[in-house]
Amino acid sequence: MTLADRLAEARRSKISSSSSGAALSTTSRQRPRRMVDPFADVKRTVHQELLETLGPKLYDADMTQSELEQKVRQTLQQVLAAEETPLTNADRGRIAAEVADDILGYGPLEPFLRDPEITEVMVNGFDTIYAERYGRLEIVDAGFADEAHLRRTIDKIVARVGRRVDESSPMVDARLPDGSRINAVVPPLALDGSLLTIRKFSADPYQIADLVAFGTLTRSVADFLEACVRGRLNVLISGGAGAGKTTTLNVMSSFIPADERIVTIEDAA
């Protein structure tokens, strides 16, 4: 059993499988048919009117993020109030939330990025999104409106970390401000549409005691690894995707004395 499997099993024993959050589909083997969004036209109209109403205010450097969010949500309510399409309060709330996510964040990815139990999000085309929860990768009932919508979101993500991705440079690896790692591939390198993967950074990193409790390693092995680090031995950590390389490295890094200098060399920064 890999480290990722053990960590997932430990989390499942603590948290009920009925945990609230972004809902995952019951199977990843058969791709479900996504329901047609009945409010797609309304959202496009509201989105456009919001952009026209706020204009340059969306890019005002003097406005804090909280002020911008408040301004966007207030304007959203005003635009929705003037919308002639009959909407229930629940419909208005949903449309407002989704448009706000698109303006302020990363669109349909936002619910999964906010969910602390989801560790990875994979976009295999604008209408196919997978999310990893409890170590299981499953398709979700969410998607982008079209390829252009996905590309705008990818451009927004990489622009915020000072990177770019286009036809002349169709692949990018980067690290978000919160530590999450991203990989984006666009045409012509991606033949069937743009691809995006986000490996989320854990806000509550594991400690060596956690790995022992999960059964990933024994107490004697944990002591041995600590001795290797404190003894300044060379250590190589390797494994397949999702095997737990970064988790293991982070845990072992906690053994480095506080007065030691740490230098990292990587191609994903």
Image (spheres, helix red, strand yellow):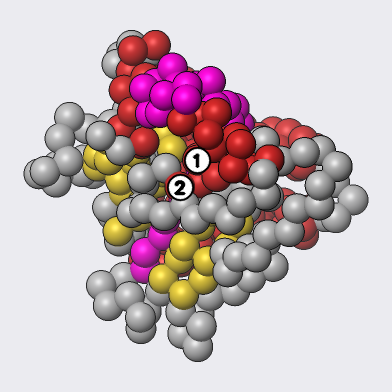
Query: Quick one: which residue is furthest to the bottom in this view?
Result: 168
Q: Is residue 26 above or below residue 209?
A: below
**Which residue has dot 1 on it?**
248
Element class at badge 1: helix
Q: Looking at the image, do the residues carrying marks 1 and 2 touch, with CB atoms under 8 Å apart? A: yes
- Looking at the rendering, which quadrant does residue 71 occupy? top right
User: How many C-alpha atoms fall within 10 Å of the one at disc 1: few (<14), some, or many (≥20)?
Assistant: some
Image coordinates of residue 42 in percent, x first then y, are: 42, 44
Residue at the image point whose x is 29% and y is 16% from the top = 17
Q: Nearer the viewer, residue 236 or 71?
A: 236
Decide if residue 111 is on the left or right side of residue 164: left
Please, what is the three-letter code of the amino acid marked with disc 1?
Thr
Residue 80 visible in this rendered orientation of the protein = no
Q: Nearer the viewer, residue 186 or 68?
A: 186
How far separated are the C-alphas under marks 1 and 2? 5 Å
Tell me the number on the disc at residue 245.
2
Quadrant for the N terminus, please.
Answer: top left
Image coordinates of residue 124 in percent, x first then y, are: 30, 58
What's drawn in magenta, residue-wise?
194-220
Q: Nearer the viewer, residue 77 or 27?
A: 27
Residue at the image point whose x is 36% and y is 46% from the top = 242
Quadrant for the C terminus, please.
Answer: bottom right
Q: Is residue 83 magenta?
A: no
Image coordinates of residue 146 in percent, x first then y, are: 35, 61
Image coordinates of residue 110 in percent, x first then y, are: 50, 40
Please, what is the three-letter code of the amino acid marked with disc 2?
Lys
Query: Quick one: which residue is furthest to the left in this view?
Result: 30
Residue at the image point whose x is 25% and y is 72% from the top = 192
Element class at badge 2: helix
Q: Nearer the viewer, residue 192 or 265?
A: 265
